[in-house]
Image (cartoon, rainbow, N blue to C red):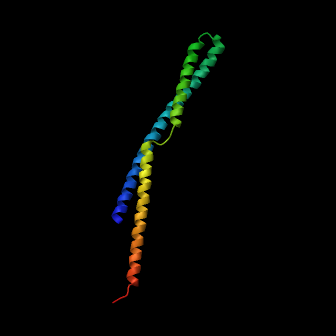
């Protein structure tokens, strides 16, 4: 009984390690996407300033090119913000979490059963008539 419990605990620990590795990879990707989005947002603000300056200074003559770059940066920023916010656990992570929970549940049940058998055995030994 105890060997099985320890095996289940080891399986739960391995599943948790797999889940944590996947979580760290996902968080790293989110961080990279957020940094790219922040850089694009800064460039978007700079281009907005340049665009405003050009509108006032030149009365809309070279604006279509700047507006195109402005739009492209805006779309790229939106895409990277969306990627950074999209943070759902992968199937790999969910399966590892389920395996860990099942293994821990079975380990608890096994330890509880082993303890109950030991207590019951001691009780029966004490209650048995001595010869």
97 relative to 110, above or below: above
Q: Residue at x 51, y 35 (%)?
A: 84
Of all residues, the one furthest to the bottom in this rendering is: 131
Q: Is residue 25 left or right of residue 57?
A: left
Name the foreground residue: 22 vs 115. Answer: 115
Percent coordinates x, y for residue 26 in the rendering: 45, 40
Q: Position of residue 12 (x, y in %)?
A: 40, 55
Instruction: Indicate the quadrant containing the C terminus: top left, top right, bottom left or bottom right.
Output: bottom left
Q: Which residue is at 54% across, 19% downward?
A: 69
Residue under the point 40% across and 50% down: 17
Is residue 52 placed above or below 86 in the rendered structure? above
- Residue 95 image offset from top left, x and y in percent: 42, 47
Q: Residue furthest top?
A: 61
Q: For the point 60% across and 19% down, which residue is it?
A: 50
In this rendering, the answer to whether 12 lies above or below 35 is below
Quick check: 45 above or below 3? above
Q: Quadrant of residue 47?
A: top right
């Amino acid at each position: 009984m105890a060997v099985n419990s320890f095996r289940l605990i080891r399986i739960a620990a391995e599943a948790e390690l797999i889940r944590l590795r996947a979580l760290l990879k996902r968080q790293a990707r989110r961080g990279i996407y957020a940094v790219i989005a922040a850089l694009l947002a800064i460039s978007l603000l700079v281009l907005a300033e340049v665009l405003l300056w050009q509108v006032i200074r030149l009365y809309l003559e070279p604006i279509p090119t700047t507006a195109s770059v402005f739009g492209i940066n805006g779309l790229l920023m939106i895409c990277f913000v969306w990627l950074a916010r999209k943070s759902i656990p992968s199937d790999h992570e969910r399966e590892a979490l389920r395996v860990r929970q099942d293994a821990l549940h079975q380990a608890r049940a096994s330890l509880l059963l082993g303890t109950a058998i030991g207590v019951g055995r001691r009780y029966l030994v004490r209650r048995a008539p001595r010869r």
